[in-house]
Amino acid sequence: MIRNGHGAAGGAERPGPGSRRAVRVWCDGCYDMVHYGHSNQLRQARAMGDHLIVGVHTDEEIAKHKGPPVFTQEERYKMVRAIKWVDEVVPAAPYVTTLETLDKYNCDFCVHGNDITLTVDGRDTYEEVKQAGRYRECKRTQGVSTTDLVGRMLLVTKAHHSSQEMSSEYREYADSFGKCPGGRNPWTGVSQFLQTSQKIIQFASGKEPQPGETVIYVAGAFDLFHIGHVDFLEKVYGLAERPYVIAGLHFDQEVNHYKGKNYPIMNLHERTLSVLACRYVSEVVIGAPYSVTAELLDHFKVDLVCHGKTEIVPDKDGSDPYQEPKRRGIFCQIDSGNDLTTDLIVQRIIKNRLEYEARNQKKEAKELAFLEAMRRQEARPEGESDCDF
């Protein structure tokens, strides 16, 4: 059980009247396939100031510089707005971060992870703000990236959750995707991400339900936490004047039992951080039972249990996992108005597999070229330049 914050920015306090001027921080990016690595970057950025503004690039800009995004710009805007450390979202942010952009939104500096972001011609997108001293760096979250997640989805096989041997084709993809520098592929064994109590504490706020709040329980895999989940949780959050939403996350093997294939794409620890980052969730139960039991309802003093319009798969004994809340008259099915599922996301990837393979290879080639240029620059004797005369 992990308690989480909710509200405009995870409960962080802003300077009051007469206190120092609020520090405004800028972050920007594609925020495609938003995951807990993105959330952790924004958490760190928010901690450096008082007001976090996040610029999100358009589909056109991303396609030009990196290749086709998985999600549309409208989906990406909404996903970023749902992250609890974000105060404001700027749509259609320029791909190259300039002083003009920082000044336009009255930002003191911008923050980016300690990885490389390059334009289509291989230039550092933060070069101008770095030279002006208005750039801060935060630590990148190891073990996850959009490239890594795309790679995992290209490995749709049961081998992850069983002792079956991967086919040669899948092993070839395992060697090509889902790797971070110096790391192992998560689908040949164990995910690189190593959960720690400190990381959970950083994402959770520990707020308990207060008198007068309505305790609402939802449960599921919440795999590849996406806009479909956000729309559902937003609807659930809006059911009460003072909601306290508890999300129960099922164990990996439980998810694999009712989802099959290679699900979940993300392991339980990764899914926990993804859900904790959502502003509509107050608490997370890690490894919640598949059936919503009387003990669970009584322990958390649940007022309402919600489920989406997706199919309710019977428990292993054939029983309805929601029979107890239905018996108590506290069960409610919610239509989020969004039919996006993890399956559909995987289908998007598989359908455009060659495009995403090309995108990942292009990105890697640009980064290697940039690093080689930097290495040559550092090795060049003082006084020499790149200019040919």
Image (cartoon, grey):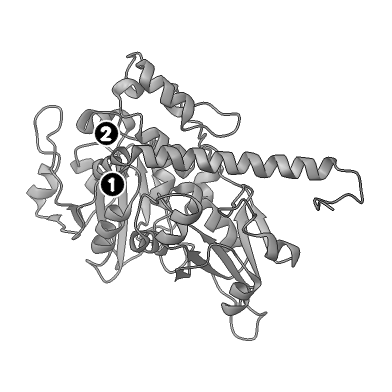
Residue 205 visible somewhere in the drawing:
no
Question: Dots 1 and 2: beta carbons under 8 Å?
Answer: no
Residue drawn 55% across the image and 34% down it: 180
- Residue matched to label 1: 299
Q: Is residue 60 above or below residue 53?
A: above
Question: Which quadrant of the structure image shows residue 154?
Answer: top left
Q: Residues within 10 Å of mark 1 (few under 14, many from 20)?
A: few
Image location (x, y in percent) of residue 82: 39, 61
Q: Secondary structure at mark 1?
A: helix
Disc 1 marks a residue whose amino acid type is His
Residue drawn 9% across the image and 49% down it: 326
Image location (x, y in percent) of residue 281: 35, 56
Image location (x, y in percent) of residue 324: 12, 44
389 or 370: nearer the viewer: 389
User: What is the quadrant of the N terminus in the image?
Assistant: top left
- Residue matched to label 2: 255
